[in-house]
Image (cartoon, rainbow, N blue to C red):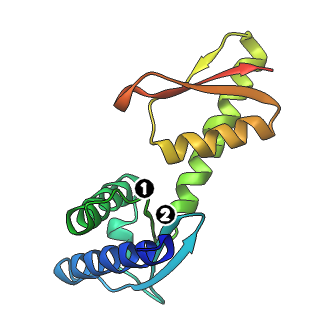
Amino acid sequence: MSDEKELEQQGEIAADFIEEFLDVADLDGDLDIEFKKERVYISVQSEGDSNLSKISDPDTVEALQELARLAVQAKTGEMSRLILDIAGSRQVKMDKLKALVERTIEKLEDTDEAQHLKPMTSYDRKQVHDMVSEAGFVSESEGQGRDRHIVVRKA
């Protein structure tokens, strides 16, 4: 199967899982599926008064994303790099990461000591690495598994 067809299959499986979850939870939302850079992006939005706020906390979205990935893996045998956004939760997460990077850089400018951040997902680490680099600083990931974290230093 081609990469494009595999992504489409992953998107369909994940979307079915999310739709079923929304039905069980009695939540309304419209799904949008996109394919970018070998990833499936699923966005759940609702117009007007929405009860999606009940599940749009970034940690909750992260957990649902992992469950959707597991649903894909159970049906295809392949790992999925699916990204889920519910009611703008992805932007909220990015704003929090940006604020974290800004605070970290302020500390670096005051102390010169390398700053160790808390462990985070590989996707979040990638976003932080990009932000740190854009700010003219250096970062690297250290640790293994759930302890993998970023260390930020002056360039």
Q: Which SS class for mark 1? A: helix
Image vertical order of residue 30 relative to residue 142, above or below: below
Extreme-front residue of the structure:
1
Q: Residue at x 61, y 52 (%)?
A: 95
Q: Position of residue 99 (x, y in %)?
A: 64, 42
Q: Is residue 11 left or right of residue 47?
A: left
Q: Amino acid at mark 1?
A: Pro
Q: Which SS class for mark 2? A: helix
Extreme-left residue of the structure:
24
Task: Kindly report the distance in space between the C-alpha atoms of the residues bearing marks 1 and 2.
Answer: 6 Å
Q: Position of residue 44 (x, y in %)?
A: 43, 78
Q: Residue at x 38, y 84 (%)?
A: 29
Image vertical order of residue 26 relative to residue 132, above or below: below
Image vertical order of residue 142 relative to residue 14, above or below: above
Bin the neighbour count of mark 2 within 10 Å (Cα to Cα): few under 14, some 14-19, many 20 and up. Answer: many
Q: Residue at x 65, y 45 (%)?
A: 98
Q: Front-most of 83 and 81?
A: 81
Bin the neighbour count of mark 1 within 10 Å (Cα to Cα): few under 14, some 14-19, many 20 and up. Answer: many
Return the mark for residue 72: none
Q: Amino acid at mark 2?
A: Ser
Q: Which residue is mark 2?
A: 89
Q: Are marks 1 and 2 in contact (CB under 8 Å)?
A: yes
Mark closest to the chain's N terminus, 1 or 2: 1
Q: Is residue 60 left or right of residue 108?
A: left
Q: Position of residue 45 (x, y in %)?
A: 46, 81
